[in-house]
Amino acid sequence: MNTKDKIIHTSISLFNEHGERAISTNHIASHLNMSPGNLYYHFKNKEDIIRHIFALYSEHLSTHFKPINKNDDAFSQLTVYLDSLFELMWRYHFFYDNLGDILARDTQLKQAYINFQLELLEQVRKIILGLRDSEMIAINEQDALELAHTLKLTVSFWTPYIKARRLSGALAEQDIYHGILKVLTLFRAYSTDKSSDKMNQLREKYTQLAHSAPSIPAALSS
Amino acid sequence: MNTKDKIIHTSISLFNEHGERAISTNHIASHLNMSPGNLYYHFKNKEDIIRHIFALYSEHLSTHFKPINKNDDAFSQLTVYLDSLFELMWRYHFFYDNLGDILARDTQLKQAYINFQLELLEQVRKIILGLRDSEMIAINEQDALELAHTLKLTVSFWTPYIKARRLSGALAEQDIYHGILKVLTLFRAYSTDKSSDKMNQLREKYTQLAHSAPSIPAALSS
DNA sequence: GTCTATAACCAGATAGAC
DNA sequence: GTCTATCTGGTTATAGAC
């Protein structure tokens, strides 16, 4: 891994563990046994690092969050979405822990964030309408947009909500599964007779995961 | 107003307008044409100021958020709750804009916050069950707790969600009414035939307010 | 590309006079 | 209760040697 990527990687870890505010560029450099000067050779400043991290986040999301394929089973698609969404929220949760601060300090990033979230909202809306077309849920156009907002708000602020409810700030894998269960609950209000069995299967699956041993799978642990 | 209250009042304003992170104790003092030394005579440090603000917040919430009176009309009670909840979120929104940071720096405050939120969750749950007993909604015990969490998450993070969606950080009165509409939407999934007319009336009321002129009423403008 | 050294700055906090 | 003066320490950022 080159130096630039090392800095990004370490920054993500430290930000997630201690919070973005608590971690200075000096902390990042010293954690890598690197001089501050070297860090500033690779990045203009701290905001520059965060912008690069945001680029990773949005790229990841764009890659894993394509509209539903009508030939596929709508529910297995939904599972894929939920898994990748919350994996992402896990991997970059520092960003939503401090969203206001981070965006307030960097107009360029804020604009990028707003544009990206608009696209994302539209993607979520299309997925909801896809589930409706597969008769998995019953929902009108207006409520589909409302639900898209509710889902986005819930997913975005799930980790801050969890962290604020316990003294030790550490997040665990189960917290993420509880978030997925929360999203399923939001869907359930619109579930049809046809889908309720499948909904319950999904709930069952994540309930099991939420109560299993708290080991972090390799895919999530970095 | 005495000096201590002036400091608290000014701190709330500046925190809400610029964010807690951007405002130092020096900023607060200089905004009051006061020396930093004087500020530190009245408060031990910045966290001490924030703790006092939190005490105001929780006191306000405790006062306005009593369990539903079974003799009263459940829906007018609900209106009272919604109004006072979102007025509170408006008045102290800086706190939720930076919740993670603020709590991470102050274990004492975090413990107080956790305790208070536990009480609040129980209050919300009781209100939901009260609405069920008035046959305004149909919901089981398990879902009542789920809904209570969803409502708390939504209300808490409504203002950060809104602020993150626009370039200018300023919040307006209408944003708050949209938050109330969002909460009503979350209730609607459980509404009964008996209540749907009243639900729509409430929606209508807040929809009007959400689209009226953006003047801030005196009660909210401080 | 990386290091050392350090400048510029600012937030947090205190001592002691009035 | 309030002010002036000041200190400590951390954060950001850069210059210049290697």
Image (tube, coloured by chain):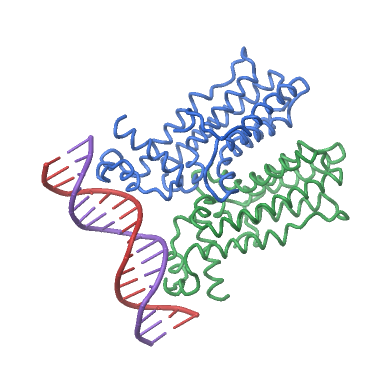
Chain colours: A blue, B green, C purple, D red
Q: What's the residue at 60%, 56% (across, down)?
A: B113
**Residue B125 versus residue B163: which sits nearer the camera?**
B125
Q: Is residue B37 above or below residue B18?
A: below
**Residue A87 versus residue A153: which sits nearer the camera?**
A87
- Residue lying at the far front in this picture: please name it: A213
- Residue B126: horizontal and vertical position, in percent? 78, 50
Q: Is A19 on the left-hand or right-hand side of B74?
A: left
Q: What's the residue at 62%, 33% (across, down)?
A: A210
Q: Is A108 on the left-hand or right-hand side of A118?
A: left
Q: What's the residue at 71%, 53% (across, down)?
A: B83
Question: Which quadrant is the N terminus of chain B positioned in?
Answer: bottom right
**Residue B20 versus residue C2: which sits nearer the camera?**
C2
Q: What's the residue at 36%, 44% (across, down)?
A: A46
Question: Which quadrant is the C terminus of chain B positioned in?
Answer: bottom right
Q: Is B35 on the left-hand or right-hand side of B110?
A: left
- Residue B42: horizontal and vertical position, in percent? 50, 73
Q: Quadrant of residue B195?
A: top right
**Residue B60 versus residue A9: which sits nearer the camera?**
A9
Q: Quadrant of residue B22?
A: bottom left
Q: Is residue A13 above or below residue A74?
A: below
- Residue A128: horizontal and vertical position, in percent? 64, 26
Q: Quadrant of residue A15?
A: top left
- Residue D18: horizontal and vertical position, in percent? 11, 42
